[in-house]
């Protein structure tokens, strides 16, 4: 490591960025072929539309997309924005990981873990699928990461965390089945939690889950509001709207330290809680009304948005800011 640290900073930064771009490019192949159920090695890159093999200069991360103007050189079909996006985000993340943890084994592991996050995020987002092998590799890498004591936990805690992660999502998913007639989470989410548990341990996994529910809520609720208005279900739309604003209001109350004025604080939170319960009652009633059976669950995409991306985004946030988030959560409840 010492020899590497003698290299000029700009050289390492350039190297990390290039490594990130190439990894992103490779991830695009992994994602595309994973979704098609094809192997990864021994096959040159091709256009998914016209199947023409790409020349080497059409395969340069980011640059090719830019100078081809986002179109395939053969069939002029639009190239998905996913390709440059994955390359860009991977390079940015690698750089961020390097700046946070330096030239260390931890950095190497975190880059691999983040690459797996990206692959799972995109497959889940595109086709609500988590490819099993991605999840099992994440579990393996996570266990090794904890075995080498690169994270906050040891191997025993990692094994417990993995089991806990898988179980809690299976339990929640089945509770959904009892209350709404649908699995609340897909099987893929349990597999993601299995790997995350091995990296973070069960305590931090709980924080990740809480954060991901918040992220998911803030993204999904606006869509639900618009949908309810379209379906002329105003009561439901207002219920969703209220849950949305209650979350934001509670956060603001907390930030402006309304907490110091005890009377005002308890009055406002009581009002919020009452409305929140009313809203939740309406939402639950609506879900029960639908009485979705399993086949309908699949069709109606009951989950609206897959939960995996929210889970992986909050895991990424927790890699860097776990202590800040813990402090913020504590200040919220105490
Ligand atoms: Zn083409």
Image: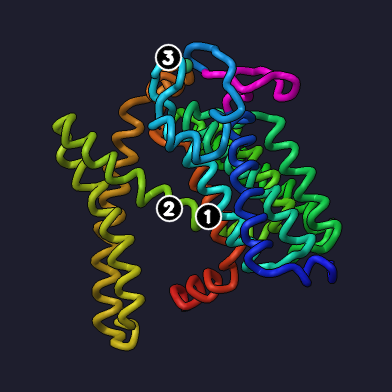
Q: Residue at x 28, y 87 (%)?
A: 261
Numbered disc 1: secondary structure:
helix
- Going from the N terminus, do you reach mark 2 or mark 1 first? 2
Q: Which residues are magenta?
A: 32-47
Q: Does the numbered disc 1 mark a residue whose Cβ is under 8 Å from ligand 1?
A: no
In front here: 282 or 218? 218
Residue at 25% over, 75% down: 267
Horizontal and vertical percent position of residue 211: 49, 57
Is 83 located above or below residue 301 in the figure? below
Question: Picture quarter containing residue 80?
Answer: top left
Q: Which residue is painted at 79% across and 60% down in the image?
A: 105
| Left or right relative to 138: residue 217 | left
In contact (CB < 8 Å): disc 2 and disc 1: yes
Residue highlighted by disc 1: 314
Mark 3 lies on a secondary structure that is: loop
* Distance of label 2 from label 1 (alpha carbons): 8 Å
Would residue 45 be counted in the magenta stretch?
yes
Mark 3 lies on residue: 75
- In the visual, does 124 lie left or right of 2? left
Q: CA distance from mark 1 to mark 3?
A: 39 Å
Report whether the residue tagged 3 is closer than 8 Å to ligand 1.
yes
- Say whether residue 29 is magenta: no
Occupied quadrant, residue 53: top right
Q: Which label is found at residue 125?
A: none
Q: Residues within 10 Å of mark 3 (few under 14, many from 20)?
A: few
Q: Label 2 crowding class (10 Å Cα cut-off): few <14, some 14-19, many 20+?
A: some
Pointer 3 or 2: first along the chain: 3
Q: Tell me, yes or no, if residue 141 can be seen here.
A: yes
């Amino acid at each position: 490591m010492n020899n590497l640290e003698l290299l000029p900073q700009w050289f390492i930064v350039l190297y990390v960025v290039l490594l990130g771009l190439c990894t992103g490019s490779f991830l695009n192949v992994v994602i595309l072929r994973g979704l098609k159920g094809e192997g990864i090695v021994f096959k040159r890159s091709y256009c998914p539309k016209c199947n023409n093999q790409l020349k080497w200069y059409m395969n340069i991360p980011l640059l090719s997309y830019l100078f081809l103007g986002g179109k395939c050189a053969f069939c002029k079909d639009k190239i998905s924005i996913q390709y440059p996006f994955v390359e860009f985000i991977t390079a940015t993340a690698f750089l961020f990981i390097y700046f946070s943890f330096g030239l260390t084994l931890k950095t190497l592991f975190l880059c691999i873990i983040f690459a797996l996050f990206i692959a799972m995020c995109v497959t889940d987002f595109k086709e609500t699928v988590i490819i099993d092998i991605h999840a099992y590799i994440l579990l393996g890498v996570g266990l090794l990461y904890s075995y080498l004591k690169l994270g906050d936990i040891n191997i025993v805690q990692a094994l417990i965390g993995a089991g806990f992660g898988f179980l809690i999502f299976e339990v929640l998913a089945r509770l959904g089945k009892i209350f709404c007639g649908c699995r609340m989470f897909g099987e893929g989410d349990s597999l993601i939690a299995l790997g995350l548990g091995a990296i973070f341990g069960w305590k931090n996994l709980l924080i990740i889950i809480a954060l991901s529910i918040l992220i998911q809520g803030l993204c999904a609720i606006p869509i639900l509001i618009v949908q309810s208005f379209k379906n002329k279900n105003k009561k439901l739309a207002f219920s969703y709207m209220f849950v949305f604003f209650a979350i934001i209001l509670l956060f603001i109350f907390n930030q402006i330290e309304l907490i110091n004025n005890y009377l005002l604080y308890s009055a406002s939170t009581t009002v919020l809680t009452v409305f929140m319960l009313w809203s939740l009652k309406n939402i639950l009633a609506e879900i029960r009304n639908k009485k979705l059976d399993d086949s309908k669950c699949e069709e109606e995409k009951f989950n609206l948005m897959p939960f995996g991306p929210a889970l992986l985004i909050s895991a990424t946030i927790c890699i860097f800011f776990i202590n800040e988030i813990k402090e913020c959560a504590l200040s919220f409840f105490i």
